[in-house]
Amino acid sequence: MGSRDFSLRPPLPKSIIPTRALSISFCTPSFAAMVNVADLHTLQEFDLAVDTRKLRLADIEAHLTETEELLSARAAFQEVEEKLRELSASQKELEWDTGEIRTKAAAIEKKLYGGTVRQPKELEDLQKDLEALRRQAGAEENKLLEIMLEVDATQKLRDKGKANLGATEEEWTREQAELLKEKAAINTELAELQPRRAAQASEIEGPALSLYEILRTRRQGKAIARVERGMCQGCRITLPMSLVQKARSGLEVVQCVSCERILFMN
């Protein structure tokens, strides 16, 4: 398997590095331990690659849940469905009440015109009852018409909400599958990177490795800084020429006099 260019990953965000500085003093900008600084730089590339992938994994885990868009679409659909259930129940109740009134009116009408009642007073009372029932039935039918129109409008809203929820769920499912696929790929990369990182660290002298780890914690994950045009690329200050010359050999640990990062030159 060919070597990978881990520098293509985005820079390490500050948020995953402890902000509390460790207590350590640096008496001199370099010490004489014979260390290949290029090895430390390679170790840093491994660490940055691992850190960036771990950060992305944390972000993926945070998104492996239902989105606000999905929750909103579901809530809107459920709200309309509940309203439709209530309206349908009201419609059935009105239909029942109207039917009952019409049945009573029909019975009175039959009695009124059936010839079985001959007393004027009783006929007059029946006529009044019939007219009252007809008015009541008319009012109930008006209410029924209104609620039927509202049911029809709400059904259309329900159908629209259902379609929107279905599309949102489909998109969410697709995104979740992509996230899980990316998560698996990153875990595979980490399974490859971490042993290589450990092997790289084992090649570095203890004092230099300890210094590297401390600086990595203190300097947002970047213990090594390149030197370009006589400037430390970690803090952007111009370095003394004597320090640049020492760093150029790459065989001893030389630190920036400002940010204390280990200086590296190709």
Image: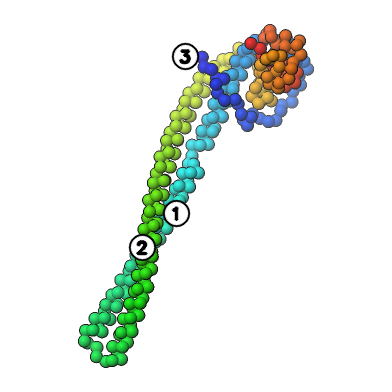
- Image-quadrant location for residue 96: bottom left
Residue mark closest to the camera, 3 vs 2: 2
* Residue under pointer 1: 79
Mark with earlier residue (3, 2): 3
Compute the Cα span from label 3 to label 2.
70 Å
> What's the mark number on residue 148?
2
- Give percent across and percent down for residue 143: 38, 68
Identify the residue at horizontal 74%, vertical 15% (top origin): 239
Compute the Cα span from label 2 to label 1.
19 Å
* Residue under pointer 3: 1
The image's colouring method is rainbow
- Residue closer to the observer: 198 or 85: 85
- Give percent across and percent down for residue 103: 28, 75
Residue mark closest to the camera, 2 vs 1: 2
Say what amino acid the circle numbered 2 marks: Met
Q: Answer few, some or many: residues within 10 Å of disc 1's Cα (few below 14, many 20 plus, some between 14 and 19).
A: some
Say what amino acid the circle numbered 1 marks: Glu
**Is residue 237 at least partly visible in the picture?**
yes
Say what amino acid the circle numbered 3 marks: Met
Identify the residue at horizontal 28%, vertical 91% (top origin): 120
- Residue closer to the observer: 200 or 243: 243
The quarter of the image holding the C terminus is top right
- Give percent across and percent down for residue 235: 71, 22
